[in-house]
Image (tube, grey):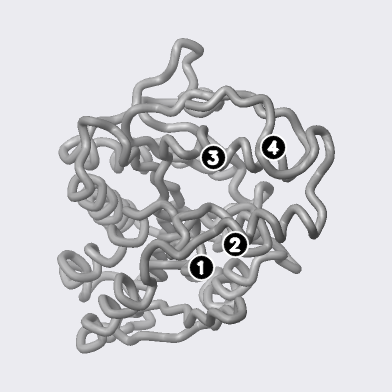
Amino acid sequence: MTTQAFYSIGTPGQPWGPAEVAAWRSRQIRQRSYQDDVVRAIDGLRPRFDVVEYGRLDYGPDTYPLFALKSRTWREELPVALVTGGVHGYETSGVHGALQFLEDRASDYGNSVNLVVAPCVSPWAYERIHRWNPDAVDPNRSFRDNSPAQESAALMRLVAPLRDRVSMHIDLHETTDTDESEFRPALAARDGKPYEPGEIPDGFYLVDDTDNPQPDFQRAVIAAVAQVTHIAPADAKGEIIGSPVVSPGVIQYAFKRLGLCAGVTEARYTTTTEVYPDSPRATPEQCNAAQVAAVCATLDFMLAHGR
């Protein structure tokens, strides 16, 4: 964990301008391939799902097609469930957990749910293992009208025709050690604010919606994931990442007011997962499996309790 007084770009107390954003962008280096890791996996799923290109990001010289996969046997009488991953591109199990769910478990729900899965909302950030897009904008604070993030705007356009029909939305995320060593210091510098070190929880947790709390739903997901990996305990203040723990492994944010992806529909059941991949008690395989278990638990609860 870093305790640095200020980030290496910008002037303390002054928000970034175009020069600082350009300096930050120049440091971002491609470290993995969206085409090889994600698009190739999606191509392998084409025989089983309808694949929709719902947008294209033009970040010259790079261009990224955005893909969602839908149930091939779509039936109007069935509930609609939305699964999103990779809104923060560096949160690896969000992307690969969504793809693993499609590969291994989605067929279990083929006769009961219409699925829409967008496994990698932010491919530029996926390749550079970063939280932001090239404009130093956080897509997961940008799900709002006139969004400043192309990634968020594209997903909102995809979801718009189904916005009132979606019964469940699960957004797959991670909390990592680099949140404290890089991303939160960068956020403070970008906004001209002091950086205040925080504490990274060791384990899986969920974020419920302050304005639409579903405690039984969240508890069911926690119970399912606890069979795969450990659940994050509250800190000495009874909090996780600065928010009060409302039940074991669950905190709350105001999804729509904060422009979070999990608030992009009018779904009754919504949650954001947070896997901790840097734990010595978790492997990458467990992290992906935890995301899959969470998706299945949300679907099972929705089907058992109605829309």
Whether residue 22 sits left or right of residue 79 in the image: it is: right
Q: Which of marks 4 and 2 is nearer the N terminus?
A: 2
Residue at 72% x, 65% y is: 148
Q: Nearer the viewer, residue 305 or 227?
A: 227
Amino acid identity at mark 1? Trp
Position of residue 169 measured from the top left corner of the image (x, y, whole percent): 43, 59
Q: Circle 4 is placed at which residue position?
A: 188
- Depth check, mark 3 against mark 4: the one in front is 3
Residue at 46% x, 86% y is: 53
Position of residue 145 measured from the top left corner of the image (x, y, whole percent): 73, 66
Q: Which of 45 and 200 is in front in this view?
A: 200
Determine contact: label 4, label 2, CB under 8 Å: no
**Quadrant assignment for the C terminus:** bottom left
Residue at 57% x, 78% y is: 57
Q: Circle 1 is placed at which residue position?
A: 124
Report how far apart the C-alphas of labels 2 and 1 lie in the structure. 7 Å
Determine contact: label 1, label 4, CB under 8 Å: no
Report how far apart the C-alphas of labels 2 and 3 lie in the structure. 15 Å
Say few, some or many: other residues with alpha carbon within 10 Å of mark 2 (under 14 / 14 to 19 / 20 or more): many
Above or below, 85 against 283 in this view is below
Q: Circle 3 is placed at which residue position?
A: 182
Q: Circle 2 is placed at which residue position?
A: 133
Determine contact: label 1, label 3, CB under 8 Å: no
Amino acid identity at mark 2? Asn
Whether residue 12 sits left or right of residue 1 in the image: it is: right
Residue 73 in sight:
no
